[in-house]
Amino acid sequence: MKAFVALSMCLVLFTCNALVSNALDTITTNQSIQDGESLISAGETFELGFFSRGDPPKRYLGIWYKKITTMTIVWVANRVAPLADASGTLRVTTHGSLVLLDGNGSDTWLSNAPIPVRNPVAQLLDSGNLVVRDAEGSDPNNFLWQSFDYPTDTLQAGMKIGWNRTSGFNRYLKSWKSIDDPSPGNFTFQLDPNGYPQLLLKQGSDIKFRTGPWNGLRFSGTPYLNTNPYYRYEFVLNEEEMYYRYVLLNRSVTSRLTLTTNGIIQRFAWIDRTQGWMLYITSPIDQCDNYASCGAYASCRVDTSPVCRCLKGFVPRFSQELDMLDWSNGCVRRNPLDCEKDIFVKYSWLKLPDTRSSWFNESMNLQECEVVCMKKCSCMAYSNLDIRNGGSGCLLWFSELVDIRGYSNYGQDLYIRMAVSESALLPSHHKKHKLVMGLAVFFGSVFLILVLTIRLLQCKKKKMKLPEAKWDSFESGDNCEKPKEDLELPLFDLFTVARATDNFSTDNKLGEGGFGPVYKGVLRDGQEIAVKMLSRNSRQGLHEFKNEVLYVSKLQHRNLVKLLGCCIEEENLLIYEFMPNGSLDSFLFDPMQRKRLDWSTRFNIIKGIARGLLYLHQDSRLRIIHRDVKASNVLLDYEMNPKISDFGLAKSFTGNETQANTNRVVGTYGYMSPEYALDGVFSTKSDVFSYGVLVLEIVSGKRNRGFHHPDHRHNLLGHAWRLFTEGRSMKLLDKLVENSCSTSEALRSIHIGLLCVQRCPNDRPSMSTVVMMLGSDIELPLPKEPGFFIERNLLQESTSQSQPNEMTMTVLSAR
Ligand SMILES: *[C@@H]1O[C@H](CO)[C@@H](O)[C@H](O)[C@H]1NC(C)=O
Ligand SMILES: *[C@@H]1O[C@H](CO)[C@@H](O)[C@H](O)[C@H]1NC(C)=O
Ligand SMILES: *[C@@H]1O[C@H](CO)[C@@H](O)[C@H](O)[C@H]1NC(C)=O
Ligand SMILES: *[C@@H]1O[C@H](CO)[C@@H](O)[C@H](O)[C@H]1NC(C)=O
Ligand SMILES: *[C@@H]1O[C@H](CO)[C@@H](O)[C@H](O)[C@H]1NC(C)=O
Ligand SMILES: *[C@@H]1O[C@H](CO)[C@@H](O)[C@H](O)[C@H]1NC(C)=O
C-alpha cells in the first residue's frame, strides 16, 4: 500500500512537471483537473492543485504561491471534506458550479450553484482568486462565483472581510485547526456589524482582540497601519456593503495576512533575497490588546505599571481591588451622573472603546454630536468618526465604555459624560454654564484640596505597606544610584499565594532558582502562576529580589516574563505568569526535547530574544542591561515564544551613560563578554555578547561551555568562527534541524551570532541593528575574531572553584 502511494506520488510529480510547460489557467466544462495536475495563473503567481496534510495524509484542493519555494497555502476548497486518496478531480459543471469528485465519482465539495450560463469556465487569476465566469459574457469581471468570497485563514490583497448588506452574506477568516489540519479551528476574524463596525478576533464567541472603529486612516487600535507606497488600506461602509481590505499598489510586492491556529493575526511580506516570509505585524501585539483586559472606564497602557488605570474622575468599582490583579470589574464614576446637568470631559490619546452599542452619523460635526449626546441620558460618550481634516462625523456610545487603551504619541479624543461636580477636569475656558461657574470654581477648589489630601494619605498608606524599611536596612554592594520611584505593583497576600500553590507543596515545586525555590500555582480565577520564593537567609538574594521587583514591574513586553505581583509578608515572594514549557536550556541541551525545536521555532526564539533585549536596552523607560542573558533565563510559553526572565542582576543606566564598572562581577561563564569577566566593565554590548553566544547555541544545539571538538581546543565560539572562515558554517547546524531548516536563515543567524561575540565591544552591533539584520536581507559586515575562543584554561580554572549546581557564579575581579 505504502509503495503504491509512493509510486502514485512519483507519477503525480511527474505529470505535474510535464504539465508546467503548457500550464493552463482556465478549464472549461470539457476539461478537468485531476490530482497531480494544476492550474497556474497567467503571470505564474499562483497555483491551484492538490496537496496533502495530516497523518495518515489526506488530499485537499487548494491555492498556493507558485514562485515561493516554501509552500504557503492561501486557500483550501474542501477543508471540511478531505479526500482519502489521490483520486480527486475538479470540474466545472454545465450549470456553472465547481465540483470536486472522489475516485467513485461522488461529489465531496461543491461551490454553490450560481445562475446558469451558456459557457461557464473556471479561471485562476493572478490575484490568487479562483473564479467562475461566463466565457461569452461581456464583462470579464462579472464573476458567478469567486474563492475570494470564501476565505479560509488568509486575507490576500484585494480580498474583502465583511458584509454584503443586501444579501446578508458575510466573509471572514477562520483559522485552521492545526498546522496539519485545514479544517476550521476555533478562531475567527470578522467584521462585527453592530453599532459602528469594527473587526473582531474571536475564539468561539469570546472576543480576544478588537481593532476598534475605522477613523478614516486606520482602525482606532491599529496605529501600525500607516500609509506606505505598497498598499492602501480600505474600509467601505455604504448602503450595500461594509468591508475592510488592502489593495496592492505595487504588483511586485507579495503580502498576506493570516489568522494562525492559535489565534494570532500576522502580516507577512515575502523577501526575495532571503527567500523567506518576513513577519511585520502581529495582533494582538501586547497585553493591552487583549479585549477589555482592564474592565470598564479604565485605560490600558503598556508603558505603565500596573498597566490598568481608571480614567480621571473614575475609581475602582470595588475599592479593595486597588491592589489586585483582576481588573475585570473595572471602574465607576467617582460622582454619579445627574443627566440634565452633566458635562463632557475630553480624554485624549486613546483607542476608542468598544462600539458594538454605538450610534453614528457621518455628516454631523462635533458640536451637533455633543448636543445629541447631552439630550439622551443613556449616551455615555461621543467622538469624531473621522479624524481626517480636523475631524468630522459623530459616534455616540450607549453602554459602559470598555476596552480602552492609552498611547503616548497616538490616539483619539473621547468626550465622556461626567457629573457637573467634575468640572475641575475641564480646561477653564470650557466651562459653559456661567451661573454655575463661580460655584464650581469654589467647590472645585475645595474638592481639589480634598482630593489632594486623600491622595496624599493614600500615598502614605501605600508606602507604609511596602517594605521600604526592611529593604533600606540592606546596604547594596555597589554605589550605583537606584531608582527611587514608587513601586506600583499589586501586592498579594500570603494566604492567596499559599492557597494557589497548595501550601507551597513539593509537588508544585518547579525548581530552584538563583536565590530560592520556584513553585507553580493556580489562582482562584484559573490563572496559572509561578511563585519565586526568596530563601530567608539569603542577603545576596534580598538585593536581587528588590532589584527584580523594581525593574520587572516596570517592564511590559511580549518577550519578557510578566511579573504579576509580589508578596512581602513573612515570605518574600514574586508572582509571575506561568511559562508552561519551562526554560530554553531544558529543550536545547536535552537530546530528546531538542527534537521539538524545529528550525522555525528556533529562528522565532532567536528573533524574540532580540526584540526583548532591544526593548530592555532602548525602548523601555528604564534602559536596562540584563547582565545574565543565557539559555536558562529564557522561558517558553505555550506557543514556544521566548520570554526573558530573571532580572536579579539587571542594572538601569541613564540616557548618556553607555557603560559602567563594577567590583562584583556576576553573571554566567560561557556567556560573559571578555571586558566584563576580566575588567568588570559592562555595557549593553556585554548583553549583545551573551546574546551572540546564545544564538550560536540555539543554532548548534550545543553549549558553549563544555564544548569539545576532536580537532582543536576551541570552544563553541572558536569552532563557529573557524567554520565561518572556512566557508563551512552550515556544519555548525544542529543535525536535528537540517531538514526543517531554511539555509539562508541559518547562515544569517550564525553570521549575526559571530558579529555579536566579537572581541571588541565597539565592533559588536547594537540590539536594534541585530533586530534589523534578522528581519531584513541587508548585507552583513564580516565578523572579526570572537572574544574568548581559546581562553578555555583561564575560564576552566576560575569556574572550577564554584559549586557545580549553582547557575549564577560570583567572583571578585582583581581590578
Ligand atoms: C465540449 O465538447 C463538445 C463535444 O466534443 C463540443 O461540442 C463543445 O463545443 C465543447 N465545449 C467546449 C466549451 O469546448
Ligand atoms: C468507493 O466505493 C467503495 C465501495 O463502495 C468504497 O469501499 C470506497 O471507500 C470508495 N472510495 C472512495 C474514495 O470513496
Ligand atoms: C450583494 O448581494 C446582492 C444580492 O445577492 C447582489 O445582487 C449584489 O450584487 C451584491 N453586492 C455586491 C457588491 O457584491
Ligand atoms: C476548540 O474549542 C473546543 C470547544 O470549546 C475545545 O474542546 C477545543 O480544545 C478547542 N480547540 C483548540 C485547538 O483550541
Ligand atoms: C515596486 O517595488 C519595487 C521593489 O521595491 C520597485 O523596484 C519598483 O520601482 C516599484 N514599482 C512601482 C511602480 O512603484
Ligand atoms: C445625520 O445628520 C444629518 C445632519 O444633522 C441629518 O440630516 C441626517 O438625517 C442624519 N442621519 C441619520 C441617519 O440620522
Image: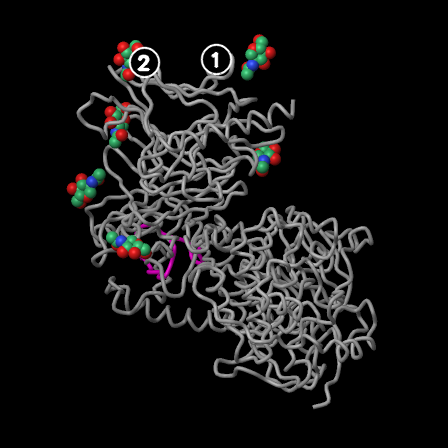
From the viewer's perspective, tell me whether residue 510 is left or right of residue 106: right
From the viewer's perspective, tell me whether residue 265 is left or right of residue 167: right
> Eyeballing the image, is 485 above or below 577?
below
- Whether residue 484 is visible here, answered yes or no, is no
Q: Which residue is mark 1?
A: 106
Decide whether residue 344 is among the magenta residues: yes
Residue at the left extreme of this rendering:
138
Q: At x 27% / y 49%, what residue is drawn?
A: 249
- Few, some or many C-alpha atoms within 10 Å of disc 2 (few <14, some 14-19, many ≥20)? some
Q: Which residue is mark 2?
A: 94
Q: How is the image coloured?
A: one colour
Task: Find out if the beta carbon at label 1 lies less than 8 Å from the nearest ligand 2 atom.
Answer: yes
Task: Please provide the residue range marked out in magenta.
Answer: 333-351
Q: Residue 96, how many percent across, how many down?
A: 31, 18
Please tell me which residue lies in front, 346 or 71.
Answer: 71
Decide whether residue 87 is among the magenta residues: no
Q: At x 27% / y 51%, what residue is drawn?
A: 216
